[in-house]
Image (spheres, grey):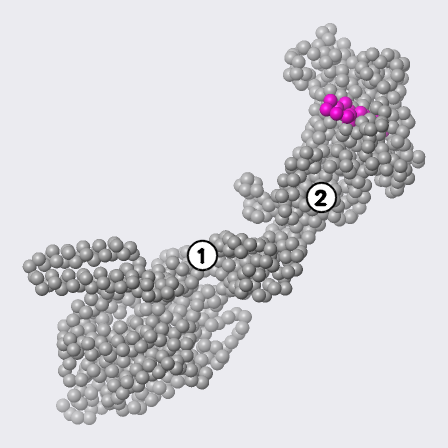
Amino acid sequence: MKLQRQNQDLDWITILLYLFLAFLGWLNIYAAVYSDEILHGIFDLSTDSGKQLVFIGVSFLIIIGILTLDFKFYDSFAYLIYGLSIGLLVVVLVFGREIAGSKSWFQIGGFGFQPSEFAKFATVLALAKFLGEGNRKLNNLKTQIRACALFLIPLVLTMLQGDWGTATVFSILVIVLYREGISPLYIVIGLLGVAIVVMTLLINQTLLIISIIVITLLLIAINPKNVKRAAVIVLAGLVGLGVVRSVDFMMTEVLKPHQQNRIMSMVNPNIDPLGIGWSVTQSKIAIGSGGIFGKGFLEGTQTKFDFVPAQSTDFIFCTVGEEQGWLGSIILITLFSALILRVITVAERQRSRFARAYGYGVASVIFFHFMVNIGMTIGLFPVIGIPLPFFSYGGSSLISFTLLLFTLLKLDSHRTQVLERL
Amino acid sequence: MNENRKLFVQGGVILVALIFAVKLFSIQVLDTNYKLAAENNIVQKIIEYPFRGLLYDRNGQIVVHNTPVYDLMVIPKEVQIKDTLEFCSILGIELQDFEDRIVSARKYSAIHPSIFEGQLTNEQFARIQDRLVEFIGFNIRARTVRQYQYKGLANALGYIGEISRRQLQNDTTNIYRQGDFIGISGLEASYEQELRGQTGVSYKMVNVRGIEQGSFKNGEYDTLSVSGKDLMLTIDADLQSYAERLMEGKVGSVVALEPATGEILAFVSAPSYDPNILTGKNFSQNYLSLEVDTLKPLFNRPLMAMYPPGSIFKTIQSLIALQEGVVTPTEEIYCDGTLITDHAPPGYYNMHEGIKRSSNNFFCQVFRRIIRQGVSENPFTDARLGVDKWKEYVQRFGLGVPLGIDLPNETPGNIPGSSYYNRLYGNGRWGFSNIYSLSIGQGEILMNPIQMANVSAIIANKGFYYPPHMVKNYDLSDKYKKQVQTGINEEYYDLVIEAMSEALRGTAPRAIIRDIEICGKTGTAENPHGADHSVFMAFAPKENPQIAISVYVENAGWGGGAAASIASLLIEDYLKGEITRSWIEDYVLKGEFVKGEILN
């Protein structure tokens, strides 16, 4: 094969989808903060829509920066960027500014900066770098632990900041490990663990404990001869019971009542219809009242009259649901699905493991945000405050997603060269 | 294997997208509850209560109007009070009350206002008004209640109150809502339809803080409120006030009519109460104390009390007798005073003298002639036919039947006929001797005071009347424009009127007014339970009568005393606008009638 192949073109499908989402997001932010009484233009810099336009502009500059930088930069400096990002996460714990209960912001001039947003990019990059080094085998326990540590460290740090929403995002990176060969059993165990935690909060404990014991016994009964497997099953059952008891212990002994309430109403909004449940109830009312065709642009009464909280950020989907109706929502969901699937396609065509793993990391993070954010507004997910990528109001979020996506596109445009380097 | 894993991830993305699409379809398209909930969020129904119609007296003086009261409203979701204890002390309520009320308001709605404390006292209002900005979630709503200009006329005006559950259920018009006010008694009840007006409704959009954001769908569903119709009463407020003053400390009633129209000029039920005590928030407390009062201030005596008329009934007896021809106008009948106890001395009486001197024996004989006309050989049958004929006559005077006054709860009184006595004594087992007390207005005969006044008006009109009424808005009904005839010749009325004008000199000298020719008839109704009732009916002046009146004072002795004095003072006040005989006024106001009076 010849050296120095031509650069490939940028993936225009992804770019178009990106531009489309950012533009629609900007329009909907305007609709979300719109009020009949105080008329601001969509460009008014004192409003969210005006500011978002500035953020979009900044994102374009960053795109130019990404595309100008040598594509080898990301591979070479991945760990440095990661180390820097982890450093920022530690520093923000000490010097950060507390906004809405979480200490995750740096105040720089008039704008806030959230290191945890940047950490998503850095973590995805570092994980890809780690997996791309040599020929790592993910069936090796040591490798598994090191790979997981890469995203568990920022996860714990953001959790310490009190930003549980962003923290959970890091956990989705197991999809990258899955794609790169880790046993699906881990995924199954992880999902089971989450299911047991949620069920502990929702249903009668005795019932849950009995069910776990019964299921364990049944599984043993199915494999009566295999002693080793039986031992594993018993161990799993005991761990399950341990999870139930420790969740219960955390809830009743460690957490304060208001924290308990918050967690409880996250899983079941009906517990506190005027508190956290209020957000979900009002969000569903806003979306549900949209009908098939919606009430029309700027005509959404629930968002206009402030019934929906955080309407330009975490609950931006309410504006779409209410004003654009079911059809508008479907179009938005299709755009997001198309973007994620396109990113997966792009990832799959990479010839280096680094680039492919990075691509899957990007797809996973966008997918997790998309799933949790929209799921939360329609009551399918607990209220975890994370933004809708490219769409919600917010500079840190938009810029970090732009960074994530366009770094992939940069790597993609050099995909043939990457192969040669290996 | 890796190809499979790629498919799994892609499949996961598509699955989530599909779940979202289905869930959205179910809440946006299939489930309509969210649309209702959204409207419920933003639309606030504001009821604009119409002004209830005002009441004026016949001279345009205001009698009943509306006065603003203030309710303290709360929106539970917004309540933010720094110092709840202080808030409670301003309102004068307990902390527990505060919490209970917030809880019950929240039950109604967290985001729509409900009443926290209704009808603030002036003191509460003054104290809380300045501090309201500190008590977030609370605001003041103004509405109106009835205010009565005069302390009297309470029973005639009636009162309004919150509509009862039963009334609400029976309301087929769907005009009323829970919490609406409705006329419960008196004119407020009988003219409810005119007075209430039309409630207006407007739908406003509000934001999450309950702040108005304009009208819903450009006011498409809004209706304006229409004020209730004002009523002009036939009452003369000055005469009414004076009559009430004269009746203070007495039990009984006064009714004054304008004979030419049937309009009620004064309407007193004594004792009465201040109607204003039944408008405020102490309604139930005050109402209870009125209800248990042994003097029954809530009893509307002019309409509901049934009294034996006593001697004033002799005027009707004479008219019937003359019309029936059983006595001629000049015929003299010897009365020896043996038939019935009598204050009139024995001797020859003609009709004129009989009325003038209120001879019981004369009317006993006259009544005998009315009853026993010899139509039948059988004295019992004869009496039966006679009584029914008599009853038919009496009913033409609006007695024993409701007059159709525009107030609720009118009693018809009792004019006994043959069926009545058949029930009492058995078929054919009674004769004149059983019923002779009717001749002098005693016995089973019962009339209410308004009927007595109406009889006086009939005599003044020489044979007809308009049903008495209290509202001058004649466009509302034709009922009070219709003249009712008694069918008795005018010349017989002339005779009775002559006798009545001369009667006063003998039976009620206190009633005589120097330059007003007054025609009257006293009565002293026998009361088996205590002192006799003082009864008087009169009209004046004799030519072109302006006022017909009946006064009934319970346990006040002879008719020429209390009742005649009160009637005479009222006639003088109405016709001359001044009182020249202060000694009579003093005598009435002092109210010691029975002691030291010689019963005639």
Mark 2 residue element: loop
What distance separates the C-alpha of mark 1 from that of mark 2?
Answer: 48 Å
Q: Using the image as rendered, state which of residue A308 and residue B70 is in the foreground.
A: B70
Residue at numbered disc 2: B274
Residue A197 image point, x, y percent: 27, 63
B387 over B150 or under it: above or below:
above
Q: Magenta stretch?
A: B520-535
User: Closer to the camera, B396 or A142?
Assistant: A142
Comes first in the chain, label 1 or label 2: 1
Badge nearest the viewer, 1 or 2: 2
Which residue, as the protein is rendered here, is positioned at the far left? A225
Task: Give the residue at mark 1.
Answer: B36
Q: Position of residue A407 (x, y in %)?
A: 29, 84
| Residue A120 locus on image (x, y percent) | 30, 79
In depth, the one of B493 and A228 nearer the eye is A228
Callout 1 amino acid: Leu
**Residue lying furthest right in this view?**
B514
Relative to residue A199, is residue A100 depicted above or below? below
Q: Chain of mark 1?
A: B
**Chain ID, mark 2:** B
Q: Is residue B579 above or below residue B34?
A: above
Q: Say if residue A104 shows up in the picture.
A: yes
